[in-house]
Each structure stands twice: as structure tokens, then as C-alpha cells.
Image (spheres, rainbow, N blue to C red):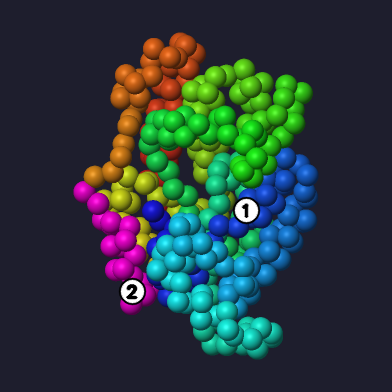
Amino acid sequence: MVSPIFGYLDKTEQWQVWYEYEYLSILYFVGELSTQSASALLKLQADRHLYYLMIGRNVNFRKTDHSSPYYDGLEEVYLSRIEQTDGDHVLDRKENKALILPLHVHYLFGSTDILYKGFDKILKLYLITIRDPFFLIDAWFNGEWPSKLCEKSREFHICCECDEGTVPWFAINYAKEYLSANELEKSILTVFNYYSGVKKMYSSLSEIDLAKTLVIEHEEFAVRPEPYIDHICNILNTSRSNRFNDIMKKLSLPRETIDYLGYEAFLIKYKNNLSYRYVAMLEKLETLYTLLKSDIKASQ
């Protein structure tokens, strides 16, 4: 809901989903890449990525994909670039100066700070969206993600072989517990450990990194997006484009209501399927999420 907005800010490319950024960050997280190597590869990838966008190369033109410019209504921008010649002169064009490249990644905040280290001063904004954790557990479980990851050939996530078996990269530090859990328990473990990492990392950010970090609460953004968008524009030194209202209408923003589950409703729905240990974990998660939101409001 947030990412498509970037394509409708001045001097900003359409939001980009290139998993190479995630793969490099994960390899750093599991100790397979040094800080120097990961940083160099991230910057090289970003430079190449931005140049390719300038000439319409490797753009996703599948009309049904959310990451396609067709989905956001920006197809004419990128189709017009395909006919242009490539070369050094592309970088000298006025319209290609000081472009903003929005990258969409998953689950990294809370596990690794390599994007801060790797991009350093050229990283202007690190945006994290948080959402009701009980809604996320429910969605993860009903989406059957615990049975898809590391099992389905079409899921291109990095998995790690541990003494106990194979787990998704984000579960490497609680692999034994993860592998002994059922699908619902794995979903709880995933979200609980994710938000534990997010809170810990957010609390430990340096002043410099904190200044370039914006945490958006999904439920609040849905009904009151304008203050967040103003903040984004201020940090990036940009403004809404002439067609900005088009994307707001497409995303149905602002909205009157948003899907929300919450702790009590989750317990009513699943309590008969949970051991005391996991009920206790859910209680801790509710407290953890409340504290995280409090930390964020105190610092933003």
C-alpha cells in the first residue's frame, strides 16, 4: 500500500522489487559475505539498476504483477525509454540527475543493518511498515507460508541447512524450535522473532541512522496517509507529482477502515489449537508490539 506511492513523487522511479538486494543482505547476515564485500556489491547493484531503469532495460512489464509499471499506471514512462539509445550520454540528461531509487525488501530490518552500512550516505530514507502482528500470523498461517518456504520450487527464498534440518534464513537462530513446531506455531515464531528483532534494532540505531528511518503503522497510514507522505517528501526533498491523486485513488487512500485482528480475537480463533507455551508467547508479543509503537512515537 505504501510502495506504489513513490512512483508518483517527483524525481522518483517506480518502486523496485529486485531480490538481489535481499540475497546480498541475507548472505551478510549468515556470515557468508564481509561488510566490505556486501557494501560494494549493494552499491554496484544499485548503480546498474538505476542505469537500466533510465533506458527501460529489465523492467517488469507483466501487466498483472503489482511491481509492474502497468499496475501503477506508469507504463508509458518506461515504454518510452526502450527506444532510447544507451551510453554515457544517458547519465548526462537533465531528467536523470539526482534520481531517487525506491527499493522494496522483505524482513531485513531487525536482522541486519547492512543496508545502512552498505549504502551509507546515499541511503536517504529507510522506511519500515509495521502491522498488527496477530493479523500477520493469521495471514502467514492461512497463506500456508510455513509449508511453502524451503519446499516449493517456485519460492526463491534463501534457506539454510542446520544440524536439525533446513529452515528459512530468518529462522536460523531458532532452527530447532522452528523445525519441531507445527504450521501455526511456526507462524507465531516467525512473527514473534521478527518483531523482537525490529524492536531491538530500532532501539539501537545511531542518531544518524535514526534520522533517516521512518516507521509507518499500516493501520494509521490507511486512514491518515497525508502526514506520512509529507514526512517522506521532506526527507527525500521531493514533492507530489501532478498525477499523485491517481495513485491515491487506485490505492483507495485514505480509507475509513482497515483489516485488523488483534490479540483477543486471535485467541478466540486459535486458542484450542495452542499449547500454554504459545499462548504465553502471544501475550509477550502483544506487550512487545505495544512497547515498539511507544518507542517509535517517542523518537519520530
Q: Is residue 56 above or below residue 287?
A: below
Q: Residue at (51%, 77%) from the top-left corner? A: 79
User: Residue 2, located in which quarter of the rendered image?
Assistant: bottom left
Instruction: Report the front residue among 60 and 249.
Output: 60
Q: Which residue is mark 1?
A: 19
Q: Residue at (36%, 62%) from the top-left corner? A: 229
Can residue 170 be seen here? The reply is no
Please give left or right for residue 82 compared with residue 263 in the image.
right
Type of amino acid under label 1: Tyr
Residue 136: image location, x then y, percent: 43, 35
User: Residue 296, located in which quarter of the rendered image?
Assistant: top left
Prevailing secondary structure class for the magenta stretch in the rendered image: loop
Residue 267: image location, x then y, percent: 35, 20
Q: Is residue 36 above or below residue 173?
A: below
Q: Which residue is mark 2?
A: 243
Judge the density around disc 2: few (<14), some (14-19), many (≥20) Cα neighbours within 10 Å.
few
Secondary structure state at the residue bearing disc 2: loop
Judge the density around disc 1: few (<14), some (14-19), many (≥20) Cα neighbours within 10 Å.
some
In three-dimensional space, the C-alpha distance between marks 2 and 1, rounded to whole angstroms, equals 29 Å
Residue 198 located within the stretch drawn in magenta:
no
Residue 55: image location, x then y, percent: 60, 78
Q: Residue at (62%, 36%) from the top-left corner? A: 152
Instruction: Report the front residue among 222 and 37.
Output: 222
Please give left or right for residue 182 compared with residue 233 in the image.
right
